[in-house]
Image (cartoon, helix red, strand yellow):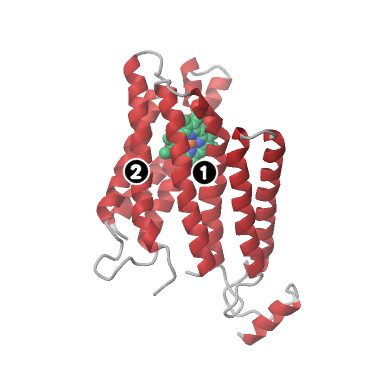
Amino acid sequence: MPLVTRWFVRLSFLYLVAALIVGIGLAARHVGWTASWVARLSPTYFHFFMLGWVTQLIFGVAHWMFPNYAPDAPRGREGLVWGALVGVNGGLILRALAEPLVGRAAVWGWVLVLSALLQWFGVVAFVWNTWPRVRPRR
Amino acid sequence: MPKLTVWYVKASLAYLVLGATFGALILSHKGVPWAPWTWRLFSSHMDVTLLGWVTLLIMGIAYWILPRFGVRRGRERWAWAAFLLMNGGLVLAIAAPWLPHTRVLFLLARLGEAASVGAFVFHAWPRVKPLMVSTDTSSLSGGQRKMGRNR
Ligand code: HEM
């Protein structure tokens, strides 16, 4: 299992745990046990689950298992895949921080823009590297 | 990787980029308002990520790795139909918010997506079986029974 795959898989487990913890906070909000700003974490809950857990697990396993790119570079350009790891995780964490705080100070709005860019570049970097590996076995 | 899987997986990767683009546009607008129209991408973002990215990827990989009947993958035409129906449904779902008769188009999109999933399940159902050669072909159509014997 390549190193970057181990990072993807372990991080994906952590996001699953984190998503369910945020889910507890959201449910607790509904019975009035947590502060009202917790309700703003609803998108964090969804994206920790679907991007942090599901998509990231897929990224790790696909990078490991898809048909090789070429004999001298079996998994393509690994740098792009590390870039995807940094972009998706950096973007997700910034989003979780900034989304509940948007409106308090202008800077959080810009952090959210940065988060969107990071996630977007992360996804594109992964797809860029993986695209040529999706082909019938040679 | 069979040809149909290549189509499924490449489509799913393309939908991931599209879904991330829609999501990033909405998120940037949430941060620093610049284009209220980005909210019109919201339903497309959900459709494209959940059905286009995750579901098409799962279908494509399932088509590839589920147990086969000899060299054949069972009701292959149904898997092709599922691919076309999902793409039709998604294209309609993406276009609907920007066109007249939005609600009717959404209904058609949902019908296409549901029909796709139905067709795929019909394809995959008999392939969910132990990997070992099975002599029980009673649940298969005549054509598939023949394929099974040809193994
Ligand atoms: C580049 C990555 C992504 C970005 C920037 C992004 C952004 C967004 C934004 C801004 C919203 C609206 C949140 C709100 O209601 O205020 C949203 C909603 C949603 N997204 Fe994403 N998204 C991304 C990836 C994904 C992926 C990969 C999935 C699923 C596989 C997904 C599924 C959803 C769902 C189900 C919703 C509706 C629930 C909710 O409002 O939180 N997104 N997304």
In this rendering, the answer to whether B105 lies above or below A3 is above
Examine the image and state in which quarter residue B69 appears: bottom right
Amino acid beneath label 2: Gly
For this view, does A129 lie left or right of residue B116?
Answer: left
Does residue A35 appear in this view? Answer: no
User: The C terminus of chain A appears in which quarter of the rendering?
Assistant: bottom left
Please, is residue B28 above or below residue B86 in the view? above
Task: Give the residue displayed 59% in from the left and 52% down from the top.
Answer: B87
Q: Are marks 1 and 2 on the same chain?
A: no
Q: Position of residue B80 (x, y in %)?
A: 62, 63
> Residue A122 got which mark?
2
Disc 1 within 8 angstroms of ligand 1 (CB):
yes
Residue A131 circle label: none
Mark 2 residue CB less than 8 A from any atom of ligand 1: yes
Q: Give the percent coordinates (x, y) of residue A93.
A: 35, 33
Which amino acid, mark 1?
Thr
> Measuring 69% from the left and 83% from the top, which residue is drawn there?
B146
Name, please, the residue furthest toward the top: A104
**Residue B71 drawn above or below residue B111:** below
